[in-house]
Amino acid sequence: MKVNNRSASIRAMELLAPTGASLRQVRRVLDAGADAIYFGVRPPQKNQGRLSLLTSVVEFDFNTGLRAVEEIHRRGKRAYVTLNAYYSDDKLAQTLEVAKDLINAGIDAFIVADCGLAAALAPIKGEAELHLSILGRSTNHESAAFWRDLGVSRIIVDRVLPLRDIMAIKEKGQVEVEVFVYGSNCFNHHGLCRLSSYMNGFMCLAPCMESYRIEGMENAGPTPFRSVPLNAYEDLPLMHRAGIDALKIEGRQKSPAAISTLVSIFKNGIDALDRGESLPEVSDQKHFHKAPLTWSGMYRGIHIAHNSINQEKGLKYILRLFEDYVSYGSLKFLIDREFKPISRCYQRDTPTLFTWVSVSA
């Protein structure tokens, strides 16, 4: 059954949350107060491969994804689907067929990165919106205007942009802006990781979370790539006053408990600001960590990139992240990956700058 939710009222500043491949998780995140939910879907035919950046372990099979859209609309909220990969000609045609079925189901927005896909979707999307993924890398208002002319109505901005640049994109580019407020913080260009592709055959399987030794620099520690997670909760009043359109929590691979906790915290903060009250204080707790374990991005225009790289050398930090954030399905996927033959690609006879150190050694 198609349920259209575009007439439903939403918050002045939308709170957008992720979900993995579970309708139970969808309901839990909605109960916590999310205004919109984004997720990935697998194509109906298995040989079509992936439609978005992340591995299929956190994506709905196609029919269950359609049920997720119905469930979200039934609760008066909005449903966004990630189509944020880059596509060859044959894959583009397959992706468009999937997109047409989602449009018929009443999807509210597609999160895209490929300008070819955006151009192809624009004349057929109906009332669905196009949101530019962070992978589209729009970092100025001229770029935003280019994407707007392709049919994009919202730009998901990079966390390395100060608020003044974000507002220039919104006002001069004449688009909505969406800002990450909690999640990972990529050491490289967000999501486009050739190190991961070299090791695993996937663009982003977080090799930055592995332990390494740097040849000739034994005192450098085993974590030269690991970035400190993002937490911009304290910047909510600044974003609220500026008129940011949407706040995004990252982590389709995270556990339902983690996502629902974060949604509840940020929802309470937005509600307080909407009432003209001060931002509620939140203590450091499981699933919600503050400085020095997190950084707040560069939204205040303070260049603190050096604080975004983790210097901790122990295993405790990694284990705590697994316990707090990673869902069972994602953890099983990572374990299976390590024990399959593909893991041998870490051990090479040819000299390389980095030597992988197994945490199980």
Image: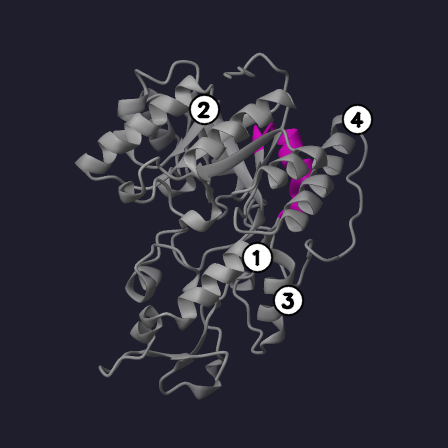
User: Which segment is the magenta one?
Assistant: 232-246
Name the residue beneath numbered marker 1. 328
Say which amino acid is labelled 3: Arg
Residue 109: horizontal and vertical position, in percent?
Answer: 45, 25
Residue at 67% over, 40% down: 263
Residue at 75% over, 30% down: 271
Judge left or right: residue 224 versus residue 282: left
Say which amino acid is labelled 1: Tyr
Residue 164: horizontal and vertical position, in percent?
Answer: 52, 37
Residue 297: horizontal and vertical position, in percent?
Answer: 56, 50
Q: Earlier in the sequence, mark 4 or mark 2?
A: 2
Q: Is residue 112 magenta?
A: no
Q: Earlier in the sequence, mark 3 or mark 2?
A: 2
- For label 2, count other residues whose C-alpha is less than 10 Å away and answer few (under 14), some (14-19) or many (20+): many
Disc nearest the viewer among 3 and 2: 3
**Quarter location, residue 343:** bottom left
Name the residue beneath numbered marker 4. 275
**At numbered mark 2, what does the secondary structure look like: helix, strand or loop?**
loop
Q: Earlier in the sequence, mark 4 or mark 1?
A: 4
In the rendered image, the residue lying farthest to the left is: 89
**Quarter location, residue 148:** top left
Q: CA distance from mark 4 to mark 1?
A: 38 Å
- For label 1, count other residues whose C-alpha is less than 10 Å away and answer few (under 14), some (14-19) or many (20+): some
Q: Earlier in the sequence, mark 1 or mark 3?
A: 3
Q: CA distance from mark 4 to mark 2?
A: 26 Å
Q: Is residue 242 magenta?
A: yes
Kindly check if marks 4 and 1 are in contact, taking CB atoms under 8 A apart as contact: no
Name the residue beneath numbered marker 3. 320
